[in-house]
Image (cartoon, grey):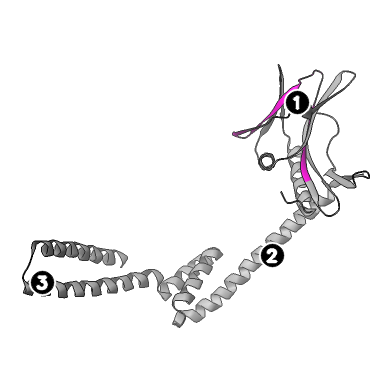
Amino acid sequence: MNTRIFEERGKILCFLLGVGFLLACGISKKDHDKVLQENINLKADITRLKAELDSALYGAPRLLEKAKIAFDIKDLAASKDSLEELLKRHPSSSEAEEAKSLLKNVFALINKEIKEKLEAEKKTIEIAARSMTKNFDEVRNLTFYKDVSTPLLGTHLYLYFSSDGKNAFGPFVYIQYEGDGWLFIEKYILKIDDETHEISPSYNEVTHNNSASTIWEVYNKVLSDDQLRFMRKIINSKKTILRFSGKDYYKDHVISQGEKTRMARVLNAYKAMGGTK
């Protein structure tokens, strides 16, 4: 049906172009009147074809059919849009009552999905919050939170945050290199699957400590929005390599699944405590 409508509209357009050509060349009054009448008829045909096209695309039966198909395949948003369009265009149609009934079911399922999603998010956040260990700083009146399984020794990366009881601050990143020789780290290069990101600390932002034959170089800083974005990419990555790039040497560390899990739990707990990043 739609193809026939477009074919007729094409014929009408060609005729109108021909009329324009004849008028430009000059014609008799009789022929002129004939052309005017045909023009009136063509306008009527265009109006009719537009109505037919509108009915084919937005008629009540068609919109109801689209809504039912979308509902059956669980595309609730598309079903809702078709039903609302039907009720707006054809409020008095025989299909309107069925549309109203189906729309109630659509809204009920949408609300159910939203509720289930919120409950799942709440559960995830509550579990994350319970997995935190906390350390209270009495001088600054801040409590610092990190994952209970965060290691003290070894080369690793972890996240943490703080709270004054009302607001959550951070998140912070703690990157520790442990080895038997100094790197004098100048930057951290993160190869996250196929993406590469860098953290370039200022000279005094990497601290250096040693004990007997073991040395530590540590970067401990609040995350910028951009850095937080690629920390989230690390969590969902297949493989992330952290390169400690020094003046003359470098060492690589593959972020473990345990590190990713701890990072995810910290960010969920941060959100649960009112974090806004």
Alpha-carbon distance for marks 3 and 1?
Answer: 88 Å
Q: Which residue is mark 2?
A: 115
Residue 262 visible here? no
| Amino acid type indicated by mark 1 | Tyr
Residue at the spot 48% in from the left edge and 79% down from the top edge: 96
Taking the image as shown, residue 145 lies to the left or right of residue 55, namely right
Disc 3 or disc 2, which is closer to the eye?
A: 3
| Mark 2, secondary structure of its residue | helix
Residue at the spot 84% in from the left edge and 51% down from the top edge: 130
Marks 3 and 1 close (CB-CB < 8 Å)? no
Q: Earlier in the sequence, mark 3 or mark 1?
A: 3
Q: Which residue is mark 1?
A: 203
Q: Earlier in the sequence, mark 3 or mark 2?
A: 3
Q: Position of residue 125 (x, y in %)?
A: 77, 53
Q: How many marks?
A: 3
Marks 2 and 1 close (CB-CB < 8 Å)? no
| Amino acid type indicated by mark 2 | Lys
- What segment carries the magenta color? 170-196
Alpha-carbon distance for marks 3 and 2?
Answer: 69 Å
Q: Which mark is residue 243?
A: none
Residue 69 visible here? yes
Judge whether 68 appears above or below 181 on screen: below
Q: Position of residue 86 (x, y in %)?
A: 46, 74
Could you say which quadrant of the image residue 53 lies in?
A: bottom left
Q: Which mark is residue 32?
A: 3
Label 2 neighbourhood size at 10 Å, few (<14), some (14-19), many (20+)?
Answer: few
Could you say which quadrant of the image residue 26 lies in?
A: bottom left
Residue 184 on the magenta segment: yes
Taking the image as shown, residue 58 lies to the left or right of residue 97, namely left
Q: Nearer the viewer, residue 151 or 224?
A: 224
Q: Quadrant of the N terminus?
A: bottom left
Residue 101 on the magenta segment: no
